Amino acid sequence: MTIIGTVVATSDSPSLENITLILNKDTQSKIERGQFVSISKSNTQVVLGIVTGIKKHNTYYETLDSSVQEIASRNYEAIFPIEEWESTQADVKPLGEINLETRRTSRLKFPVSPGSKVYVATSSVVSKFLGLKKDGIYLGDIPSNNVKIEVDLSRLLRKHLAILAISGAGKSYAASILLEEMLKRSKMSVLVIDPHGEYTSIVPPKSRNTRIEVIKGSYISIGVPELSAWEISEFIPEISAVQTRVLDNVISNLRKEAKPHYSLQDIIQNLERAETINTRTREALVSWLYSLNRTYLFSAESNPNFLEILEPGKIVILDLSDIQNLRSRRIIVLHSLRKLYYQRTRDKIPPSLFVIEEAHQFCPASSRSISKRIIETIAREGRKFYISLCLISQRPVHLSVTALSQCNTNLILRIRNPYDQDFIGKTSEGIDRSSLKMIPDLEIGEALLVGEAINYPTFFRIRSRYESDKDSSLTLEKMANRYENAWRRTQDSLEK
Ligand SMILES: Nc1ncnc2c1ncn2[C@@H]1O[C@H](COP(=O)(O)OP(=O)(O)OP(=O)(O)O)[C@@H](O)[C@H]1O
Ligand SMILES: [Mg+2]
């Protein structure tokens, strides 16, 4: 194995928290931040660490007074071998140690010695340390250590996952990798709440089969006879318990009339006819129900049947891109998650993963949203029933703290906003300062995995999709061209 550096003694290193190395000149260009290195303690014991920073050093230029200027002005570089005094230092955060014979890992209890030799950590040592699982969910690679990031499905999802990053950093791409893996090996069923219709192109038509179903928002209707008064009241934040009971009476009477297919309109008519109800209650209920009815989401029958859509190993995408109104989208999210959650608690559907894109819209931190409670309930209780959440958001600050803090694994891509970075530092367990500092520098496709799924916060490159639909990466120019072609065809046909 090639030695890449040597541990040096500085005022604060080597310690249990930090190790400084001088990198060998001929291999230093291959060392990068986020890479794992191993440091020999003995023939069988090595310390694994992660490179957190790299800096250049030259004793010649160390002094900050005018002598540096003097050196420059007198062209001493020509006389002295100043370049040769330059060294490259790397800061390494030690993570623990491993016995190469027994493969047992342990906490670092005593610092390494100055002068210890440093190597690029082998993939088997890194995998063992990170707790990766061969043939697990393959999310990406650490190219500099030749490591495949394969994580155990249960560890990744059981206690919920959050994918957080600025817009365009690759959140949906990362989620589509997860979906590919779920299709490949998992018997779980998956529901994707897709407000922008992104997943219809992310999952290329070629690979769509009976195991992937896309349901358009405009196709969804909520069967009113399936709803109790309490379920309807969840669509109306202002409603009181007394008003809900009145609504319950009206619904009970409708059911007694043996009218199986009643709609909101029927409830409204019966309310208007019921003279015993207090006028203010009646008017309030009628106006709320009218407003619900105007969303055109409610009808006498349900479509699709949420009791049947989720099967083992199947992905259902709720494409809400044709529903513009945020309240209507929230109504669909509340209705579908509530139904599926209830079915799961009775073991009527398989263990499931609910992927919620733009989670801050459906489960916001401050403002009221009718879909917030069910998402928070699933975040808190879902684990008991083998329901996992994958919350995706570009503004973690605006996401419910209750929901986000239950996401025990975070996949973090580039985040620029200091408030969001701060927030992640506070809410994401196990994330340290050195990892936090690296988040703004991540490039598209680079990610930090932290939490339950992996033993240490780990930077890696998200893998490429097995199949990709070129349309999903349409540039503005290509999109304009495509629109122009379609528009010309329409114009031509009109002229004929
Ligand atoms: N790992 C990756 N490898 C290759 N291309 C990627 C990767 N991640 C993202 N991209 C590309 O970057 C672009 C943006 O990715 P994506 O749509 O996933 O971002 P996003 O974070 O979901 O953005 P938004 O917040 O706007 O939804 C896409 O064109 C996608 O193809
Ligand atoms: Mg996206």
Image (cartoon, grey):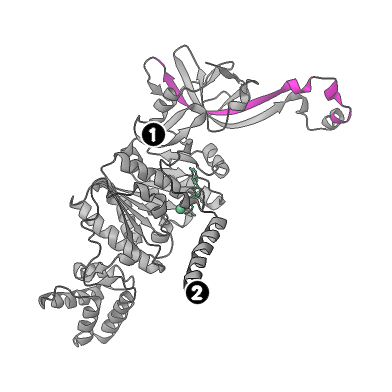
- State whether residue 286 appears in this view: yes
Residue 62 position (above or below residue 117): below
Q: Which mark is residue 495?
A: 2
How far across and how far down the image is residue 211, in percent?
28, 48
The one nearer the camera, 361 or 379, is 361
Q: Marks 2 and 1: CB-CB under 8 Å?
A: no
Q: Which mark is residue 222?
A: none
Between the residue at mark 2 and the residue at mark 1, the CA separation in whole angstroms equals: 58 Å
For image coordinates 57% across by 31% down, the residue present is 32
For image coordinates 30% across by 76% down, the residue present is 293
Please tell me whether mark 2 sits on a helix, a strand or a loop: helix
Residue at the disc numbered 1: 150
| Three-letter amino acid code of the residue under disc 2 | Glu
How far across and how far down the image is residue 146, in percent?
47, 27
Say whether residue 23 is left or right of residue 84: left
For image coordinates 29% across by 67% down, the residue present is 234
Residue 240: quarter of image: bottom left
How far across and how far down the image is residue 252, in percent?
14, 74
| Residue 89 magenta-highlighted | yes
For the magenta stretch, what is the residue range?
A: 72-101
Say whether residue 160 is left or right of residue 272: right
Residue 369 position (above or below residue 33): below
| Three-letter amino acid code of the residue under disc 1 | Glu
